[in-house]
Amino acid sequence: MRVQLTPQNGVSWGVKRVGWMLALGCVLALTGCGAVDQVKDQVTRETFAPTQPTTNGVVMHVYLDRSGSAKDLRPEISKQVMQLLDLYPNAPEVTLHWYSQECKKITTTVSSLPNLTGIMDDYVKDTNDDDKGIKGTNLSVAFRDLQTQATRAGSAQVIGVFVTDGGFEDDQSVLGKETEVLRDMPNVTTLVFIGLDADGTTKLTTLDSVVRDRFVMGTGGEAQKQFFDITLENGGPKLDQAKSAIQGQIASATPAATESAAE
């Protein structure tokens, strides 16, 4: 008996077979290019939840703006924060704080995607604004807290990350002086501002002139510190630079621990 293959839905079996073979060939080609390794790396990254730091040479302090002005931007800002702090396979200690009119510690953990996801979800959903009901954000409050944390950190390098749209109510002379205190602390190496909404405003210009210029340059005019101002829109390249700088500090501070974590 002769069996005849007839078209189904207007497509012959032969055409379907060719399409299936082409699809299989594409999958095999991707696999050969390391697609499987990429998937494994992503799965490991997303499940990497260490309970202890893999380096003791660098600590990070992240300050989350609790004022209401940046509330609508928090979902997008949160994505930037998670991208910056995804330092796998490195895992420095990271402490998160609220700040507005006051500075309040949230928790200390180890930097990784699983460890930070819940914290950043709470940041997005937070409805308290300023605990005192006073609108406004004073960066100098967070700077003074970072000074205290740096004093307690001993020989560890300290990185400060400030999450904000960039709208500060500080007296600029006061903020400038607090910046210079951080500049003169040897173990405070890097300041990162993330989520800046600088479009059509003077926020970025003010931040750079009051904070960056004082922090980066030493008393003799030489560049001593690192500063990154990452805008919410088109901030990807600067974010990558900041992340690379942080990873470089971790690697130079404790190369043995970094190599061990990567194996």
Image (spheres, rainbow, N blue to C red):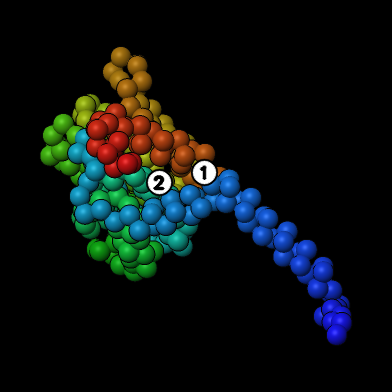
Residue 69: x and y in percent read 41, 58
Q: Amino acid at mark 1?
A: Gly
**Residue 74 appears in the picture as rendered:** yes
Please give left or right for residue 237 compared with residue 222 in the image: right
**Residue 181 appears in the picture as rendered:** no
Please give left or right for residue 117 compared with residue 14 in the image: left
Q: Nearer the viewer, residue 60 or 20?
A: 20
Q: Nearer the viewer, residue 223 or 153?
A: 153
Q: Amino acid at mark 2?
A: Leu
Q: Quadrant of the N terminus?
A: bottom right
Is residue 179 placed above or below 49 in the rendered structure? above
Q: Nearer the viewer, residue 49 or 179?
A: 49
Distance CA(mark 2)–CA(mark 1): 10 Å
Check residue 84 in the rendering and tell me which mark sits there, or answer none: 2
Check residue 236 in the rendering and tell me which mark sits there, or answer none: 1
Taking the view exactly as shown, the residue that stands out farthest to the top is 220
Mark 2 vs 1, N-terminal side: 2
Q: Residue at x 84, y 74 (%)?
A: 12
Residue 200: x and y in percent read 56, 46
